[in-house]
Amino acid sequence: MHAVASVRGVEDALGIEIPPNARLIRNLIEGIQYVQDHVIHFYHLHALDWVDLVNALEADPAETAKLAQSISDWPKSSEKYFAGVQAKLKAFVEAGQLGPFANAYWGHPAYKLPPEANLMAVAHYLEALDWQREVIKAHAILGGKNPHLQTYLVGGVAIPVDPNSASALNADKIAWLKSLFVQARDFVEKVYIPDLLAVASFYTEWASIGGGVGNFLSYGDFPQISINDPDSYFLPQGIILNRDLSTVYDVDHQKIAEYVAHSWLEYAEGDSAAKHPWEGETKPNYTGPQPPYEWLDSDKYSWMKAPRYEDKPMEVGPLARMLVAYGRGHSRVKELVDMVLEKLGVGAEALFSTLGRTAARGIETLVVAEKLVEWTDELVANIKSGDLRIHNGDKWDSSTWPKEAKGWGHTEAPRGALGHWVVIKDGVIANYQCVVPSTWNASPRDTEGQHGPYEASLLDTPIADPEKPIEILRTLHSFDPCMACAVHVVDPEKREYVRIQIA
């Protein structure tokens, strides 16, 4: 996702428009990333906050099969299948080697699923491991590898389109892509969404916990015409304030500023300053715990900056995107949101919660999974029309660039709004700043003392056992945090780690 934000930033600075094939290929790359990433999050990063794996040993496989068959026609839902999963799980437990399942609060009183639902979820946890490894082969076809795809270029993509070339994107590879996208969609429709609704139905009290700041930001993404035409985005851009879905405001990135009042960073103008990313700076000033790691008398407590939109904290991510889409009148999103609320028997206020955040991720996964085949068909139609262009390189000559240019590259990563801001002077980068999803969500307080979304969402959370705070994990994991994306590697000795030469 950083790759597409980066190239879009330079394209914005230099006024480069990419060809339709490049736009569609980028949409497909990003779309299957959404689907894979969200499914992995639900099963492998979040489900065990709600699912008691060890309790699944008490399940009756026959009753588990009846439960699974009652919510989906997924073909693997047999008594024999669930018995096999239970036997595998029993071997793990008896060996005392739980592996990825070892670090959890098994038997915690906050778990509420019956044994059969636990066994069903564990089976699908294991199944999703194989599924995600298969469907992400689309990235190998379109990007050379996963992760860190190799085919993004300023001006388009590097994968050639040629129906007559075995090494290019041709009919056989497109047919393979479609089969992977159908496989992805089927799992989401018949496994992920039914599991999500089944698990959520036992935890409806979480529809009033973990609400957060109540302000939401989406840059929008998946352009249907051009990245410069926000009205064409499949997932629309917008701002929602104070949980008011009746009004969705347009996004103006120049209203974004970052604070460091409570960060282990400093600005030349002082801690009260606010900087737009084009003028931003990242200067470490660590005043945190020192050996023996006792807290110092300091207001600073985070490596995160505090981004704000018009001085307001903003939540980003699937919930923000689905709320903005709902407010903008996206028909499929509205249909699915209303269906989920009805099935769970909760009102619209449930959207602003830990449960709402988790449900929004599932809704978005289905919406995007359904669209992948349609974008593939659009790519095929464009190729059949004779348009094989994948790149626009008419501005590669830096001697034609303006003396100074500024660009904003934005995308919606699975975790939320991702922005790259670049300043180019005399043909080289003079400043480069990123504001990533976890910086928005995990931000510390600002100069006005306003909490960031994580902090605000945890206020008043009921905890059954302070020594095993599974309730805290439920809300934090609902954001899908990525601390690695939002902090910096700092070497106080200022040693050189890497040098990059540009020919």
Image (cartoon, grey):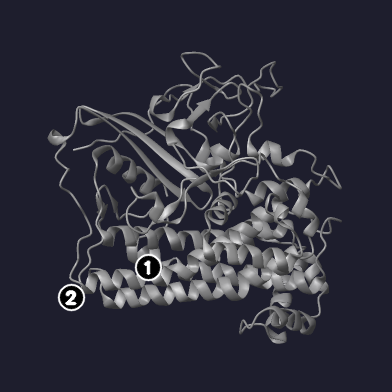
Q: Position of residue 33 (x, y in %)?
A: 46, 59
- Between 17 and 113, the one lying in front of the other is 17
Q: Secondary structure at mark 1?
A: helix
Check disc 1 and report the residue beneath it.
375
| Residue at the outermost front position | 246
Mark 1, Cα crowd under 10 Å, few <14 / some 14-19 / many 20+, is some
- Residue 305 screen position, x and y as percent: 54, 29
Residue matched to label 2: 164
The answer to whether 203 is drawn above or below residue 430 in the figure is below
SS of the residue at dot 2? loop
Figure quadrant of the C terminus: top left
Determine the image quadrant of residue 83. Answer: bottom right
Instruction: Quote the CA–CA distance across marks 2 and 1.
Output: 21 Å
Q: Is residue 267 above or below residue 137?
A: above
Kind of residue at disc 2: Asn
Percent across and percent down for residue 208 are 77, 50
Quarter of the image holding residue 451? top right
Residue 238: assigned label: none
For the point 51% across and 67% down, the residue is: 132
Q: Residue at x 72, y 46 (%)?
A: 210
| Along the line of sight, the residue nearer the viewer: 150 or 30 | 30
- Residue 365: quadrant of the picture: bottom right
Q: Is residue 57 left or right of residue 223?
A: right
